[in-house]
Image: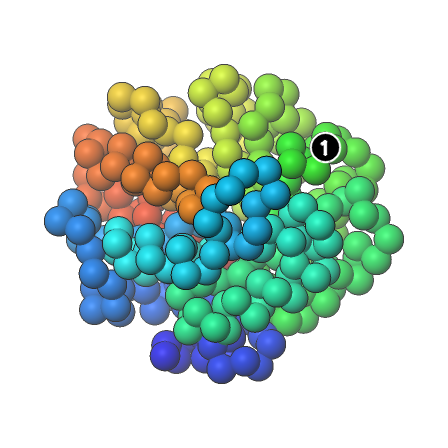
Amino acid sequence: MLEAVASVAEGSGSARDVSEALLSVRHKAETEVTPLSAQPSAPIVDCNTWVGFYPRQAIDLSAASLLALMRRYGVARALFVHTTAVFYDARMGNEIALQVARESGGYLLPVASLNPLQYRGMVEEVERRLQQGFRLFRFFPQWQNWHPTIAPFRELIDLLRERGVPFLIDCSQIGWATAIAELSQGSSVPIILTDVTSHNLGEVLCVMRFAPNLHLETSCLISPNGYETAAAEVGVDRLVFGSGAPLHYFARAFFPLIHSGLSDEDKRKILVENLRRIVQA
């Protein structure tokens, strides 16, 4: 059991050691996982994974399935949201996520989620999770049918900005990256745009050039030279590895990075260092 995540793994109900768990990756990942031959020398932390029941298709999103994928590909840690928080009830889902994290022995690190349309008690839920030590939040406008410019989400952004808490937000629609950049104008709190598609990648890269607090989760970079292009446009320091597993194939996100023309040092930044810096910010 890892010292850095002891309070989660031993059942204290706290998520406060997420950043320390990321710090421990550097020293322990090589001995804790069984990598494939294609595994890079750098440890891997995946910022975009799922656990729970997926209501739209028969896909195994169990913690056991995710942990098996991690062992197969040499992933040291995975940040995850529980589907209950996304599709049903955020408060219940966040509580379940804590339990899953404890049962994983620290390999799965919980990310809190909120639906701003469930406005009542929203501020209290944020405060509760911050007191428990959650270091990241994540939002799903596409799955929950809301737009990033709605008033409750503006209030959430303001609250997280005041607390200095970074967050991830799905950004799969044209215009959303521009709206998010405008909402966060003047803020230095890191925001990671997830589940970007080939249709809006150009917009995202353009927006990131004038919004230095925005970062890109990399599961969209699957085209030839995708990583090289993104790194040239916005810098490798703003790319954060994520796969969407087990909802999406891990290899689809992983191998384009491994086989890219980026240096080993740049790959290390994308796989672990950039996320560590964001969580510690």
Kindly identify the residue that appears in the image at 64 percent across and 61 percent down: 94
**Horizontal arrangement in the rendering, residue 229 relative to residue 168 (left or right):** left
Kindly identify the residue that appears in the image at 39 percent across and 50 percent down: 46
Residue 230 position in % (x across, y down): 37, 27
- Can residue 173 be seen here? The reply is yes
Quadrant location, the N terminus: bottom left
**Horizontal arrangement in the rendering, residue 51 relative to residue 276 (left or right):** right
**Horizontal arrangement in the rendering, residue 54 relative to residue 73 (left or right):** right
Kindly identify the residue that appears in the image at 37 percent across and 29 percent down: 221
Residue projecting furthest to the front: 58
76 lies above or below 271? below
Tell me the amino acid under the disc marked 1. Answer: Asn
Q: Which of the 4 image quadrants contains residue 257?
A: top left
Residue 108 position in % (x across, y down): 44, 63
- Can residue 239 be seen here? The reply is no
- Dot 1 falls on a residue whose secondary structure is loop
**Horizontal arrangement in the rendering, residue 192 relative to residue 132 (left or right):** left
Residue 106 position in % (x across, y down): 43, 70
195 lies above or below 130? above
Mark 1: few/some/many CA within 10 Å (<14, 14-19, 20+)? few
Residue 22 position in % (x across, y down): 39, 63
Residue projecting furthest to the right: 120
Kindly identify the residue that appears in the image at 65 percent across and 59 percent down: 93
User: Label 1, on which residue?
Assistant: 145
Identify which residue, 189 or 25, lies in the foreground.
Answer: 25
